[in-house]
Image (cartoon, rainbow, N blue to C red):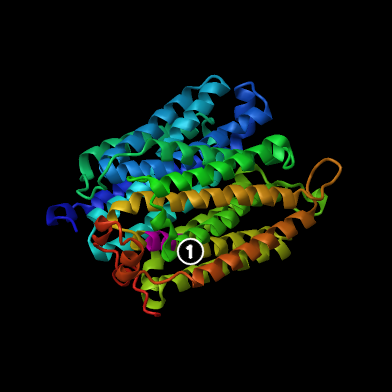
Amino acid sequence: MTTSSRRSHYQVTYAVLAVSVAAFALLQSLVTPVLAEIQTDLNTDQATVTWVLTAYLLSASVFTPIMGRIADKVGKERMLVVALAALAIGSLIAALAGSIGPMILARVIQGIGGGVLPISFGIIRDEFPEKRIPGAVGSIASLAAVGAGVGLVVAGPIVKLLDYHWLFWLPMIVTALAAVAAQVFVPESPVRTPGRISVLPAVLLSAWLVALLLALSEGGTWGWSSGRVLGLIAAAVVLLVAWVAVEERSASPLIDMKMMRLPAVWTTNLVALLVGFGMYASFGFLPQFSQTPSSFGYGFGASITQSGLILLPSSVTMFVMGNFSAPIARRIGPKYVVAIGCLIAAGAMSIVAFAHQHEWQLFAATAIMGAGIGLVFACLSNLIVAAVPPEQTGVASGMNANIRTIGGSIGAAIMATVVTASTFTNGVPRESGYTHGFLLLTLVMVGAAAVGLVIPRVRRAVIEEHLTDEPEHAQLGVVAAGTLVGDKSE
């Protein structure tokens, strides 16, 4: 663990990390409700303006694990400053953009800030007292998840009071101050991964992620059976196989495939994929449902601000339950908390599917959903931190966050297909589309609960058995899951 002098500053370090992660999380969804206004102001078309979202998604997906790995090798505090600087610079360019090209470039630069999340987990593991690690990881993970909902809620009031440029000015100010604070207050970690950074694995990882996420993002526009979409999916599969083969043979892999095959890692990542599927799909379509005029037999004709407020209860309960996840996990075991959280979220999805005649029902459903997802994400982050050696915390956490994003992309694409399978003559989905869509999300969350139950308890012997040819992985520090998340159930 760290020296006592560094431990004495862990609360200041936590404050800097919390602000950093919150700013990054907000930028994920702040622009979603105002795309139409950006389209008009920048004199572009709907297909092009969607790249304001797509470019950010692709960039963050590529850079999150890469930034985490670089941080493991060259220093977490240093790379935290780099990630925050990227967020600030990207926000500045976006705020000043007078055309769509600079705006898209700005969003690509902002995506580099995706490294904030895995780097924060690594800093917490290296610098915090052991008893404080679960709670800190849980609350940081909750902040990351909450940001997606809060961004949708606050975008409307900010634009109404100021204009959409302030959706970038405000994050720029916050992230610039956070970068300075990180440089001054966050100590540099002594935990490093030896070896050089391999370029080819990074290129292949970027290539297959871009191909996959581009196909998922544009499938609805281009057509799922179009040559471009099918070609991108085929390319993603080929590049993925090539990436795994290169990583297997690399003396200094970007992502250790032995680590990814650990039962505690792959099961946790699978839960993250399924929960990301459910959460992002629901966040994307609940506002659309509430904005539909009631003349179509459902919906409430809500404004952008009103529809965003429907997600506010989920943001509150997500953060609250995320902070309670660690003590609950110590009592019953983290995998049971994950399973219970998934079932709670499944119950919320089923409420939306079958009881959506009144707005209060949606408010209740989102509050319940947030409670379940808050429990899940906080525990998943702790499980990943517990399952890998300290020197691989950054890349493992980065991939877990990345897999959640991929799950969200898949979920949004499939949900769009289900919801729009039957529409009125003007293209508005029928009520049955939302019923079927949220019923699908219910089943996905039940599946996530089932996977959560097979997450194994992490033991030192298990990791050493899987990594016998990697001597440095024997330095497990706080890896003992009994210390970190206290699984008393086995």
Give how far across and how far down residue 451 sits, in percent. 53, 68
Residue 296 shown left or right of residue 178 in the figure: right
Amino acid of disc 1: Thr
Above or below, 58 relative to 192: above
Above or below, 209 relative to 99: below
Residue 5 shown left or right of residue 98 in the figure: left
Give how far across and how far down residue 399 sits, in percent. 44, 50
- Whether residue 480 appears in this view of the structure is yes
Residue 123 shown left or right of residue 221 in the figure: left
- Whether residue 23 appears in this view of the structure is no
The residue sitting at the front extreme is 249
Q: In the rendered structure, does residue 376 fall within the stretch colored magenta?
A: yes
Residue drawn 63% across and 48% down? 412
The quarter of the picture where the C terminus appears is bottom left
Total residue callouts = 1
Q: In the rendered structure, does residue 316 fall within the stretch colored magenta?
A: no
Which one is in front, 197 or 330? 197
The residue sitting at the right extreme is 425
- What secondary structure is marked by label 1? helix
Stretch in magenta: 375-384
Return the residue at label 1: 267
**Residue 3 sits in which quadrant?**
bottom left
**Residue 86 sits in which quadrant?**
top left
